[in-house]
Amino acid sequence: MTALLIEIVLSVIVVGGGLFGLIGSWGMLRLPETMQRLHAPTKATTLGVGAAIIASDIQSWTFTTRFAWEDFLIALFLFVTAPLSALMLAKVHLARNLPAGSVPPPLSGVWATEAADRPQQGAPEDPLQRPD
Amino acid sequence: MILSTALAFAMGCFALALVLNLIRIATAPTLADRILALDTMTINVIALLMLYGARTGGVSTFEPAVLFAMTGFVATVAFCKYILRGSIIE
């Protein structure tokens, strides 16, 4: 009875996770703007893969002798790194595709992306080649 | 029985998501979209690996999943860094 209950709960988690993964990739194909397209994989797909990992963990804990606790580390790593990749991709989009001044200015100075990361005209000076 | 059907359904969902990612890579309008599609492909592959491990039972898919997670993240950051600055390690 308990095994059947656990199986039903696991099935709900697994089906929900699969649907979230599919929605994430479908949203990346469907949404109109690049900044909007950034949302779908970083949120929906991360939730889907988290559900898959947690379901796999509970399944190994309940139905086999091996409890794969270290799989939680993968979920933790993905939850930590997904916002970082989204931040880097947003910086790439901001530097390459949006004109300067298309985002509101910060309270003081300029955005660090606009000051440093916009690709410079011409080759950057290589300090190793410079004669002292 | 219920669980194996659910696992097969979820694996089909993630496989279809991989196909959608491939279409996105082929038809991406900007460079950021293409890198995003590559990043999403690695995440979908991790989910497929975990579901495969749960379906076969007892097969440890921890090591390939960790490899995919780490190389996927490092590759995304390296691509972005190269596009932004022209070099990866300054």
Image (spheres, coloured by chain):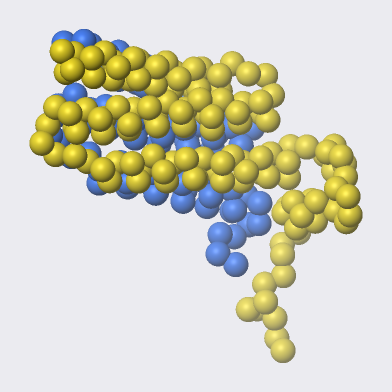
Chain colours: A yellow, B blue
Please provide percent x and percent y for residue A29: 55, 19
Please provide percent x and percent y for residue B62: 25, 43
Q: Which residue sits at x=49%, y=45%?
A: A80
- Nearer to the camera, B26 or A17: A17
Please provide percent x and percent y for residue B10: 32, 17
* Residue situated furthest bottom in the rendering: A132
Please provide percent x and percent y for residue A122: 76, 59
Q: Which residue sits at x=72%, y=89%?
A: A132
- Nearer to the camera, A16 or A124: A16
Q: Quadrant of residue A76?
A: top left
**Is B31 on the left or on the right of B50, as rendered?**
right
**Is A113 on the left or on the right of B1, as rendered?**
right
Q: Which residue sits at x=22%, y=41%?
A: A68
For the N terminus of chain A, the quadrant is: top left
Look at the picture and state if A15 lies above or below A93.
Answer: above
**Is A15 on the left or on the right of B28, as rendered?**
left
* Residue situated furthest left in the rendering: A65
Look at the picture and state if A45 lies above or below B62.
Answer: above
- Nearer to the camera, A89 or B56: B56
Q: How many marks?
A: 0
Q: Is residue B24 visible?
A: no
Look at the picture and state if A49 lies above or below A8.
Answer: below
Look at the picture and state if B81 lies above or below B30.
Answer: below
- Nearer to the camera, B33 or B3: B3
Q: Which residue sits at x=30%, y=17%?
A: A9
Q: Quadrant of residue B2?
A: top left
Q: Is residue B86 visible?
A: yes
**Is A19 on the left or on the right of A55, as rendered?**
right
